């Protein structure tokens, strides 16, 4: 979806809510508004029938675009989930040839997923994308490089530390490392290791966003940074402990999830659109690639500091 569509849809929905709540009282003074609210609290007896009919009809007209948008969003959610449902149902019935264990629970869960996906996507377009773009424009107008870089780092750090996927993989990694005997097996040691891993990844994503912001300002080609980064990753795999390499690779993927991607993408596109000579299509994207690259480097460095360099000949 283009920036223009995001802005048009956000303006349309904002206009709907403004009209819906203010339509009845848009021409009233504060005193008239209070009196009207008081009379409605007491009942609708003081309002003439034709006024009630007019108000209801106008409100219905105001709600109609929102209802159409809601139905459209529900259909988009169903369409996006349909391939997953087809695969699961097909393998369950044609390959495994087994009945579904809890049909009612599956149907209710699927309905929740559809509604949740619809609300999530709508929330991104109404909230996270616009605020990311707006802050990028504000920082560009302010002209403070230091504050822009600080904001980019803190944005990457704060969104990553809250990633549910990162929390899950850090907890799982602490259990596996403890079972391998590399750390203690008690709960406090595992929790400390998981927190250290999460902080390492969060700092790495903050540094990635900082580098990405600086790249947009300077106009550096993103592919050169990506190539250089992966050369470092490949070199580090030969010296990092075997126990951390797989975790490092997976950490690069879980950081680009539901919380980080919308804000980081909006920041990059908004910043590129605010700077003369920058193309949002060329310069605005690429931060997500950097955010998935730096965790691999930082986590392997964390493993080297924590467990030491891999012994030669250990494979």
Image (cartoon, helix red, strand yellow):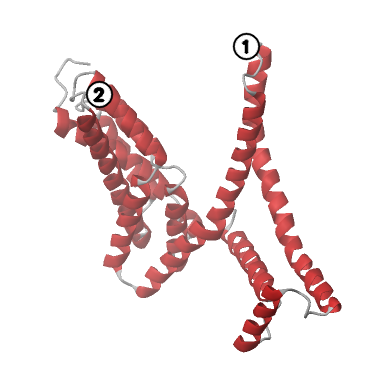
Residue 302 percent location from the top left of the image: 20, 36
Among the 4 quarters of the image, the one containing residue 194: top left
Visible residue check, residue 258? yes
Q: Residue at x 76, y 74 (%)?
A: 44
Q: Residue at x 47, y 45 (%)?
A: 258
Left or right? Give the position of 26 relative to 165: right
Mark 1 and mark 2: Cα distance apart in space: 34 Å
Quarter of the figure with the C terminus: top left
User: Compared with residue 103, is residue 70 higher up or lower down, i.e. above or below?
Assistant: below
Secondary structure under tag 2 reads helix
Using the image as rendered, state which of residue 151 and residue 33 is in the foreground: 33
Residue 57 percent location from the top left of the image: 81, 69
Secondary structure under tag 1 reads loop
Q: Which residue is mark 2?
A: 177
Among the 4 quarters of the image, the one containing residue 204: top left
Residue 118 percent location from the top left of the image: 61, 47
Left or right? Give the position of 69 relative to 147: right
Residue 269 percent location from the top left of the image: 47, 58
The furthest residue to the right: 50
User: Compared with residue 256, is residue 145 higher up or lower down, i.e. above or below?
Assistant: below
Q: Which mark is residue 239?
A: none
Q: Which residue is mark 1?
A: 96
- Label 2: how many Cα within 10 Å (few below 14, some 14–19, many 20+): some
């Amino acid at each position: 979806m283009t920036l223009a569509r995001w802005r048009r849809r956000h303006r349309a929905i904002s206009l709907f809510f403004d009209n819906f709540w203010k339509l009845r009282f848009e021409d009233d003074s504060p005193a008239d508004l209070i009196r009207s609210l008081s009379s409605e609290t007491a009942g609708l007896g003081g309002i003439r029938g034709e006024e009630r009919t007019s108000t209801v009809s106008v409100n219905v007209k105001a709600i109609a675009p929102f209802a159409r948008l809601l139905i459209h969003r529900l259909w988009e959610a169903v369409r996006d989930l349909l391939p997953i449902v087809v695969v699961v149902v097909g393998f369950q019935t044609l390959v495994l040839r087994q009945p579904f264990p809890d049909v009612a629970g599956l149907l209710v869960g699927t309905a929740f997923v559809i509604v949740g996906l619809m609300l999530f996507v709508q929330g991104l377009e109404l909230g996270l994308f616009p605020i990311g773009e707006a802050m990028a424009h504000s920082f560009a107008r302010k002209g403070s490089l230091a504050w822009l870089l600080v904001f980019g780092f803190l944005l990457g750090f704060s969104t990553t530390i809250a990633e549910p996927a990162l929390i899950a993989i850090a907890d799982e990694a602490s259990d596996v490392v403890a079972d391998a005997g590399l750390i203690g097996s008690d709960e406090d040691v595992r929790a400390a290791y998981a927190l250290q891993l999460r902080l390492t990844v969060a700092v790495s994503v903050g540094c990635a966003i900082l580098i990405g912001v600086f790249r947009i300002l300077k106009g550096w080609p993103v592919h050169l940074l990506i190539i250089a980064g992966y050369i470092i990753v490949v070199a580090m795999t030969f010296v990092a402990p075997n126990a951390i390499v797989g975790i490092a690779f997976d950490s690069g993927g879980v950081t680009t999830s539901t919380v980080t991607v919308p804000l980081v993408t909006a920041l990059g596109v908004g910043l590129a659109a605010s700077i003369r000579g920058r193309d949002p299509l060329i310069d605005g994207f690429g931060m997500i690639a950097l955010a998935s690259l730096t965790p691999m480097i930082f986590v392997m460095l964390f493993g080297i500091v924590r467990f030491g360099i891999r012994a030669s000949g250990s494979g």
